[in-house]
Amino acid sequence: MEGMDVDLDPELMQKFSCLGTTDKDVLISEFQRLLGFQLNPAGCAFFLDMTNWNLQAAIGAYYDFESPNISVPSMSFVEDVTIGEGESIPPDTQFIKTWRIQNSGAEAWPPGVCLKYVGGDQFGHVNMVMVRSLEPQEIADVSVQMCSPSRAGMYQGQWRMCTATGLYYGDVIWVILSVEVGGLLGVTQQLSSFRNGVQHTATSQAVTQTTYQ
């Protein structure tokens, strides 16, 4: 398990402390990003308001509030293994996003963990998928059914692993999607699914013929 202590880049924090911005939405967004989307916007606003909207002080207050003895599971993002990854997709098109993740810690994940939408564009109605408890160093693929937005453009969203008690952990997983009228991602996945179906049928027939000879 990895501890809650986070080593924030001093140079990065100095840049933010010198911003001098009074835009509360910007401060909330930056605070949330620095925490790896550990807090929702309302929680970020609470700590910022408590420290008179000083970003550096709010970060310190948050980690002072969190118990240093609390440990969370470990998760590392390995790679995006989505079929057709990198291709654009037409508007209003169903597709499946698949990521390869690893339990990079020394202990098994607790039961009831899930991959959960935390920010940006959601791409459909699914906001979480259950994930089985992985053993230390075990790798698994996690898939989410999604739907592209109705308008062309570039979109992005973030997902994170979450325990049954609501504690987020591990790397932030980004979805970056290019929506274009002539996009091929949807067709690519349909063709792959069709080929896999044909291969499965052929294999089943071969096994059946061998069994009954």
Image (cartoon, rainbow, N blue to C red):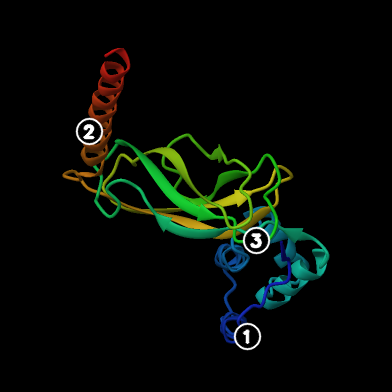
> Where does label 2 land, which residue?
195
x, y percentage for residue 199?
Answer: 25, 30
Q: Residue at x 40, y 38 (%)?
A: 146
- For disc 1, the neighbor class at 10 Å (few under 14, some 14 to 19, many from 20) is few
- Determine whether label 2 and label 1 are within 8 Å by CB: no
Which of the two marks, 2 or 1, is nearer to us in this view? 2
Instruction: State the CA–CA distance, disc 1 to disc 3.
Output: 26 Å
- Quarter that holds the C terminus: top left
For badge 1, the amino acid type reads Pro
> Where does label 3 land, which residue?
105
> Where does label 1 land, which residue?
10
Quadrant in which residue 132 is drawn: top right
Camera-side residue: 143 or 16?
Answer: 143
SS at badge 1: helix
- For disc 2, the neighbor class at 10 Å (few under 14, some 14 to 19, many from 20) is few
**N-terminal label among 2 and 1:** 1
Quadrant in which residue 11 is drawn: bottom right
Instruction: State the CA–CA distance, disc 2 to disc 1.
Output: 52 Å
User: Of all residues shown, which one is farthest toward the left?
Assistant: 182
x, y percentage for residue 26?
Answer: 55, 66
x, y percentage for residue 105?
Answer: 65, 61
Q: Is residue 75 left or right of residue 4?
A: left
For badge 3, the amino acid type reads Gly
Quadrant in which residue 198 is drawn: top left
Q: Residue at x 28, y 55 (%)?
A: 86
SS at badge 2: helix
